[in-house]
Image (cartoon, rainbow, N blue to C red):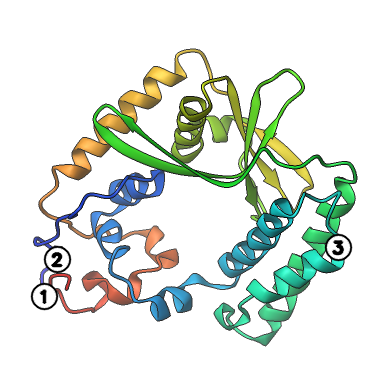
Amino acid sequence: MSDNPTFTTYRESPRRPLTARNLEDYALCPQKYLLSFFQPPRETGRALGGPVALHQAVRAALIEGDRAGGAAAVPLERLLGWFGQHWDGACCADSLEEEQLERQGREMLRRYQEAHPDQPPALAVDLRLLAEIGGHEFVAVADRVEEQPDGTLLLLRYKTTRRPPGPSELAADLSAGLLWLLGEQHFGRPARVGISALRRGRILLADFPPGAREALERRLIAEAERLRQARDYPTRKGSHCRACRSRRQCPAWGAPAEGPP
């Protein structure tokens, strides 16, 4: 087997809109980007790991709550019930991790509920934003959209990570930048992007510097063109492989170096 196996037969047909994750995966490892399209559901679930399963269950419960009117309108018991429906402990390494993460998820939801006694209904929930930039279609999702007193919009994403990014990290994050661009284009008015850091009970806002819009657009266009023009998808082994969901299918780690189905 080659030290740097590739897939050479892949073409996106029809082309789907690009996410920031697509661009980041391709820049990190083209093979990781490619394999993300062909991973069987059972393997995806197995590769998630407990922390990702926790995030998915907590986010799903909060989305359900926002659709029902927000924290001020939904009893905690109902929110926890939704969490239980979406929680998949089978993704955890063992029963101890499953128990710990489930407890953490319930505690995050309890704190969130207590911190938002007067929360107004969201303007939009789980909103998929789609737009063209420089001839390429991009897509991003806002978990919750709020209207601020000054008329600006706040596009939020829920985060369950232990170390959420700070404002400067958020401003440099391609995913946050794409959400900001698409949000302002969709609503036609100023918007801010932030994360609801659920472990800390805080909202952290991205602080985009002057000229950020033009720089972001140039970066998105350049990376999208590089990805669209690709003909080979080499592997790039590194520390990122440890958390890769596609490692079981990767030829760099022993999987057959065959083209996708």
The image's mark for residue 76 is: 3
Q: Specify the amino acid type for callout 3.
A: Leu
Does the residue at mark 1 contact the one at mark 2 (Cβ under 8 Å)?
A: yes
User: In this view of the protein, which residue sits in the foreground, 100 or 86?
Assistant: 86
Q: Is residue 245 left or right of residue 164?
A: left
User: In this view of the protein, which residue sits in the foreground, 69 or 228?
Assistant: 69
Mark 1, other Cα within 10 Å: few <14 / some 14–19 / many ≥20: few
Q: Specify the amino acid type for callout 2.
A: Pro
Mark 2, other Cα within 10 Å: few <14 / some 14–19 / many ≥20: some
Say which residue appears at 49% left-offset and 36% top-offset: 179
Say which residue appears at 46% left-offset and 79% top-offset: 46
The residue that disc 2 covers is 5
Position of residue 181 measured from the top left corner of the image (x, y, whole percent): 46, 28
Position of residue 210 measured from the top left corner of the image (x, y, whole percent): 50, 13
Q: Is residue 51 left or right of residue 248?
A: right
Element at badge 1?
loop
Say which residue appears at 31% left-offset and 24% top-offset: 218
Position of residue 135 measured from the top left corner of the image (x, y, whole percent): 24, 30
Element at badge 2?
loop
Residue 127: which quarter of the image?
top right
The residue that disc 1 covers is 1
Question: Number of marks in the image?
Answer: 3
